Amino acid sequence: MSYEQFFLELERESLKVVAALNKAETIRFISHLDADGLCSAAILAKLLLKYNRAFHLSIVKQLDSATIEALKKENYNTYLFTDIGSGQLSAIESLLEKGNVIVIDHHPPDKEVEHPNLVHINPHKYNIDGGSEISASTLSYFLTKLFGLPNSEHLAVIGTIGDTQEEEGQLAGINGIILKEKSANVEVRKGLRAFGRASKPIHKTLAYSTEHHIPGVSGDESSAIQFLSEIGLEIKNGDKFRSINDLSEEEEKKLITGIIMRRIDSTDNPEKIVGDSYIIKNQDGTLSDAHEFATLLNSCGRQATQSIGLMLCLGDKNAVKASNELIASYRRKITKALRWFDSKKDDPSVIVQTERAVYIKGKKEIDDTMIGTICSIKASSDDFKKDVIIGFADSDNGVKVSGRVASDFDFNMGEAIKLVSGRFNGEGGGHEKAAGGKIPFGSEDLFIAEFEKQLKI
Ligand SMILES: [Mn+2]
């Protein structure tokens, strides 16, 4: 379906959303625990606040049958889900007897449900790929725009980036349309893709980059300083450390060339380190850079401080200080997890390597909220030249599974995890390139054996 037709469909669906919301007293609002979930929640919350509608918002890690059962016992007749719900329609169906359910999501639906009480807005229904063309935040943006809600473009961009929907370093599909909006409060700048470019000293940004591995620089601040002096870049301006955003265009080109030279043996496309940055207007530091903002939100989500993340999205200045401490502790957690990984790299009982895959058995040693991040980092590094990375970590009620496709390998991770975890009565699903699930304790090896069969098809 063309995007034009999709927007017409969205307009039609929006009328159903209004009809359902108008019948509600207090809206029970549930969103997903990550940057895209927080941004879509904030966009919809702005709409509800604008129209003075009462709502009760919860941010959830996943929507399993237990969560739905708990929601069902609450005393509400209208449920609103953002960035979650499409993959759990079979479970959500039971809520329909209580009243209206609105699902605004971009994950692949687990089944088709037609019900007068259900408003299900999802790009997959119109053959638009929710994994690359539109995030839940972008979807929420275009939906609320129909009601005249301004000033949310940055949230759509941040949510999209948080869901790693950039294609070759750019926003594509419907996500890209946001940047052309007349009202857009986001500016595009081409340059080195690196977390910290707006707020951190250059050497720290390079040493702790989770986006790209730079041989001889990654993980080591003093080597990073050495590298910068070799390529002739001043790291300080007076006694203040410079950030990448402080570099002139000429200097940034020098830096990019230097990094490409260091990565000459990498199988990655050298261009991968360059991409679009998004500068959010009228903001400073971390909050002025969409990539940094997205990382900050992902760290808020994962550290059970979602309310800070939500407040940041809603523009609450008081949340900024609290969030700085959060991001520092998030970085410490990542560093600790990566150190653990390095110490186990050669232990085949922990890191299992097969022809196409690497499996990381984190057990209790790696936080279940960190395993997905570690898989993403390893998928973009050169440590293993494999097609897929799978991580396991113990959580409260089973083993959390995270999977990433790390190459051009044509493989649907969401389908594979759903299928394989289903064999152990587990739950799972997600996007083509990134997905997750849950399996019973101790079933990692069985999962690996079954997953290997999927890789051979
Ligand atoms: Mn999402």
Image (spheres, grey):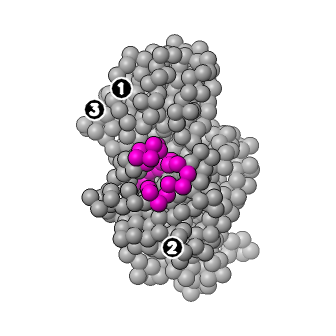
Q: Mark 1 belongs to which amino acid?
A: Val
Horizontally, is 197 left or right of 190 in the view?
right
| Distance in Å between CA atoms under marks 2 and 1 | 45 Å
Residue 78 or residue 456, whichever sits in front: 456
Q: Position of residue 262 (x, y in %)?
A: 47, 82
Mark positioned earlier in the residue sequence (2 or 1):
1
Residue corresponding to mark 3: 5
**Which range is magenta?**
421-447
Residue at image x 41%, y 81%? 264
- What element does badge 1 sit on? loop
Residue corresponding to mark 2: 348
Residue corresponding to mark 1: 113
| Distance in Å between CA atoms under marks 3 and 1 | 22 Å
Residue at image x 70%, y 59%? 328
Q: Mark 3 belongs to which amino acid?
A: Gln
**427 in the magenta segment:** yes
Mark positioned earlier in the residue sequence (3 or 2):
3
Q: Position of residue 349 (x, y in %)?
A: 53, 70
Residue at image x 63%, y 78%? 220
